[in-house]
Amino acid sequence: MSTADAQLWDEVAALVAHAHAPHAAAIDALKLVQSRLGYVPDTVIPQLAAALHMSPAALDEVATFYNLIFRRPVGEQVILLCDSVACWMLGRDALQRHLTTRLNITQGETTPDGKYTLLPIVCLGACHLAPALMLSDILHGNMTPSKLDVLLGSAAQ
Protein backbone atom coordinates (compact mmCIF):
# COMPACT_ATOMS: atom_id res chain seq x y z
CA MET A 1 0.00 0.00 0.00
CA SER A 2 1.38 3.39 -0.96
CA THR A 3 1.61 6.34 1.42
CA ALA A 4 -1.24 8.04 -0.47
CA ASP A 5 -3.40 4.91 -0.08
CA ALA A 6 -2.60 4.67 3.62
CA GLN A 7 -3.43 8.35 4.10
CA LEU A 8 -6.77 7.92 2.29
CA TRP A 9 -7.76 5.00 4.50
CA ASP A 10 -6.64 6.89 7.61
CA GLU A 11 -8.94 9.74 6.57
CA VAL A 12 -11.80 7.32 5.95
CA ALA A 13 -11.23 5.87 9.43
CA ALA A 14 -11.35 9.39 10.89
CA LEU A 15 -14.67 10.06 9.14
CA VAL A 16 -16.09 6.82 10.54
CA ALA A 17 -14.80 7.63 14.04
CA HIS A 18 -16.59 10.98 14.03
CA ALA A 19 -19.90 9.63 12.71
CA HIS A 20 -22.70 8.56 15.05
CA ALA A 21 -22.73 5.25 13.17
CA PRO A 22 -20.15 3.99 10.67
CA HIS A 23 -22.56 3.91 7.72
CA ALA A 24 -23.49 7.56 8.39
CA ALA A 25 -20.10 8.52 6.94
CA ALA A 26 -20.86 6.82 3.60
CA ILE A 27 -21.42 9.92 1.48
CA ASP A 28 -18.48 11.80 2.98
CA ALA A 29 -16.26 8.75 2.47
CA LEU A 30 -17.37 8.39 -1.15
CA LYS A 31 -16.70 12.10 -1.75
CA LEU A 32 -13.27 11.74 -0.14
CA VAL A 33 -12.36 8.81 -2.39
CA GLN A 34 -13.62 10.73 -5.41
CA SER A 35 -11.59 13.80 -4.47
CA ARG A 36 -8.44 11.68 -4.40
CA LEU A 37 -9.03 9.33 -7.33
CA GLY A 38 -11.27 11.48 -9.54
CA TYR A 39 -14.10 8.92 -9.29
CA VAL A 40 -15.13 5.94 -7.15
CA PRO A 41 -13.86 2.80 -8.87
CA ASP A 42 -15.56 -0.56 -8.37
CA THR A 43 -12.36 -1.92 -6.85
CA VAL A 44 -12.63 0.47 -3.87
CA ILE A 45 -16.22 -0.36 -2.96
CA PRO A 46 -15.58 -3.61 -0.99
CA GLN A 47 -12.83 -2.11 1.18
CA LEU A 48 -14.75 1.11 1.72
CA ALA A 49 -17.91 -0.81 2.56
CA ALA A 50 -16.02 -2.84 5.15
CA ALA A 51 -14.68 0.35 6.75
CA LEU A 52 -18.25 1.69 6.90
CA HIS A 53 -19.68 -1.59 8.27
CA MET A 54 -21.88 -1.93 5.19
CA SER A 55 -22.25 -4.54 2.52
CA PRO A 56 -20.67 -3.67 -0.83
CA ALA A 57 -24.15 -3.80 -2.40
CA ALA A 58 -25.54 -1.28 0.11
CA LEU A 59 -22.63 1.11 -0.48
CA ASP A 60 -22.99 0.69 -4.24
CA GLU A 61 -26.66 1.67 -3.89
CA VAL A 62 -25.65 4.88 -2.11
CA ALA A 63 -22.91 5.61 -4.64
CA THR A 64 -25.17 5.11 -7.65
CA PHE A 65 -28.09 7.04 -6.15
CA TYR A 66 -26.17 10.33 -5.95
CA ASN A 67 -25.47 11.74 -9.39
CA LEU A 68 -22.44 13.70 -8.19
CA ILE A 69 -20.61 10.55 -7.16
CA PHE A 70 -18.89 9.47 -10.35
CA ARG A 71 -18.54 5.71 -10.80
CA ARG A 72 -16.36 5.89 -13.87
CA PRO A 73 -13.51 8.21 -14.83
CA VAL A 74 -14.46 11.77 -15.73
CA GLY A 75 -12.51 14.64 -17.21
CA GLU A 76 -10.39 17.07 -15.25
CA GLN A 77 -13.37 19.42 -15.40
CA VAL A 78 -16.97 18.24 -15.27
CA ILE A 79 -19.60 20.37 -16.96
CA LEU A 80 -23.00 19.78 -15.35
CA LEU A 81 -25.60 21.20 -17.71
CA CYS A 82 -28.90 21.90 -15.97
CA ASP A 83 -31.86 20.05 -17.42
CA SER A 84 -34.62 21.89 -15.53
CA VAL A 85 -37.70 23.31 -17.21
CA ALA A 86 -36.52 26.88 -16.58
CA CYS A 87 -33.12 26.20 -18.17
CA TRP A 88 -34.72 24.33 -21.05
CA MET A 89 -37.12 27.24 -21.73
CA LEU A 90 -34.31 29.81 -21.62
CA GLY A 91 -31.77 28.19 -23.92
CA ARG A 92 -30.34 25.00 -22.45
CA ASP A 93 -30.61 23.14 -25.77
CA ALA A 94 -28.58 25.82 -27.55
CA LEU A 95 -25.89 25.46 -24.88
CA GLN A 96 -25.84 21.70 -25.31
CA ARG A 97 -25.53 22.00 -29.09
CA HIS A 98 -22.73 24.52 -28.67
CA LEU A 99 -20.86 22.31 -26.19
CA THR A 100 -21.36 19.25 -28.38
CA THR A 101 -19.94 21.09 -31.38
CA ARG A 102 -17.14 22.87 -29.55
CA LEU A 103 -15.93 19.89 -27.51
CA ASN A 104 -16.92 17.21 -30.04
CA ILE A 105 -18.64 15.13 -27.35
CA THR A 106 -22.22 14.40 -26.38
CA GLN A 107 -23.73 14.14 -22.91
CA GLY A 108 -22.02 11.47 -20.86
CA GLU A 109 -18.79 11.64 -22.83
CA THR A 110 -15.31 12.92 -22.06
CA THR A 111 -13.07 14.74 -24.51
CA PRO A 112 -10.24 12.60 -25.90
CA ASP A 113 -7.68 14.72 -24.03
CA GLY A 114 -9.49 14.00 -20.76
CA LYS A 115 -10.09 17.66 -20.02
CA TYR A 116 -13.91 17.88 -20.05
CA THR A 117 -16.84 15.60 -19.30
CA LEU A 118 -20.34 16.80 -20.18
CA LEU A 119 -23.14 15.55 -17.95
CA PRO A 120 -26.78 16.51 -17.61
CA ILE A 121 -28.13 17.26 -14.14
CA VAL A 122 -31.80 17.36 -13.28
CA CYS A 123 -31.66 20.71 -11.49
CA LEU A 124 -28.97 22.98 -10.11
CA GLY A 125 -31.48 24.96 -8.06
CA ALA A 126 -30.59 28.15 -9.88
CA CYS A 127 -33.72 28.83 -11.90
CA HIS A 128 -33.25 32.56 -11.39
CA LEU A 129 -29.97 32.20 -13.34
CA ALA A 130 -31.33 30.00 -16.14
CA PRO A 131 -29.84 28.64 -18.23
CA ALA A 132 -27.22 27.46 -15.78
CA LEU A 133 -24.35 25.04 -15.57
CA MET A 134 -21.64 24.07 -13.16
CA LEU A 135 -18.04 23.82 -14.24
CA SER A 136 -15.90 22.03 -11.67
CA ASP A 137 -18.21 22.92 -8.77
CA ILE A 138 -18.64 26.59 -9.73
CA LEU A 139 -22.13 27.71 -10.73
CA HIS A 140 -22.44 29.84 -13.88
CA GLY A 141 -25.78 31.39 -14.79
CA ASN A 142 -27.44 33.30 -17.59
CA MET A 143 -25.22 31.32 -19.94
CA THR A 144 -25.03 31.89 -23.67
CA PRO A 145 -22.84 30.21 -26.26
CA SER A 146 -20.52 33.24 -26.30
CA LYS A 147 -20.25 33.20 -22.49
CA LEU A 148 -19.42 29.50 -22.74
CA ASP A 149 -16.58 30.28 -25.13
CA VAL A 150 -15.15 32.77 -22.65
CA LEU A 151 -15.62 30.32 -19.79
CA LEU A 152 -13.92 27.47 -21.58
CA GLY A 153 -11.19 29.69 -22.98
CA SER A 154 -9.54 29.40 -26.34
CA ALA A 155 -7.76 26.15 -25.40
CA ALA A 156 -10.91 24.00 -25.62
CA GLN A 157 -11.45 22.52 -29.02
Image (cartoon, rainbow, N blue to C red):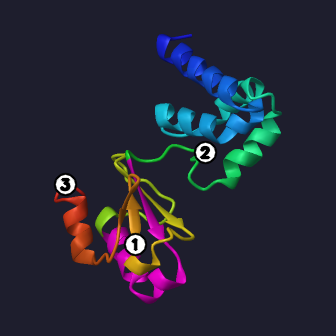
Mark 3 sits on what residue?
A: 155
Quadrant where the N terminus sits is: top right
Is 117 rendered above or below residue 114? below
- The kind of residue tagged 3 is Ala
Is residue 50 shown to the viewer in this render?
A: yes
> Which quadrant of the view contains residue 32?
top right
> Which quadrant of the view contains residue 47?
top right
Left or right: 34 as drawn, with respect to 57: left
The residue drawn where x is 29% and y is 67% is 102
Q: Please, what secondary structure does the residue beneath circle 1 have?
A: loop
Q: Which residue is the extreme one toward the left?
A: 154
* Residue 99 counted in the magenta span: yes
Q: Nearer the viewer, mark 1 or mark 3?
A: 1
The residue drawn where x is 64% and y is 53% is 66
Question: Whole-Å distance between the Cαs marked 1 and 3?
Answer: 22 Å
> Which quadrant of the view contains residue 6?
top right
Left or right: 11 as drawn, with respect to 148: right
Residue 106 position within the rendered picture, expressed as x and y whole percent measured from the top left: 45, 66
Question: Whole-Å distance between the Cαs marked 2 and 1?
Answer: 24 Å
Quadrant where the C terminus sits is: bottom left
Q: Using the image as rendered, state which of residue 116 and residue 27 is in the foreground.
A: 27
Part of the protein shown in magenta: 77-101
- The kind of residue tagged 1 is Ala
The residue drawn where x is 40% and y is 72% is 132
Mark 2 sits on what residue?
A: 71
Is 30 rendered above or below residue 141? above
Is 33 rendered above or below residue 133? above
Q: Residues within 10 Å of mark 1 (few under 14, many from 20)?
A: many
Q: Which mark is first along the chain, 2 or 3?
A: 2
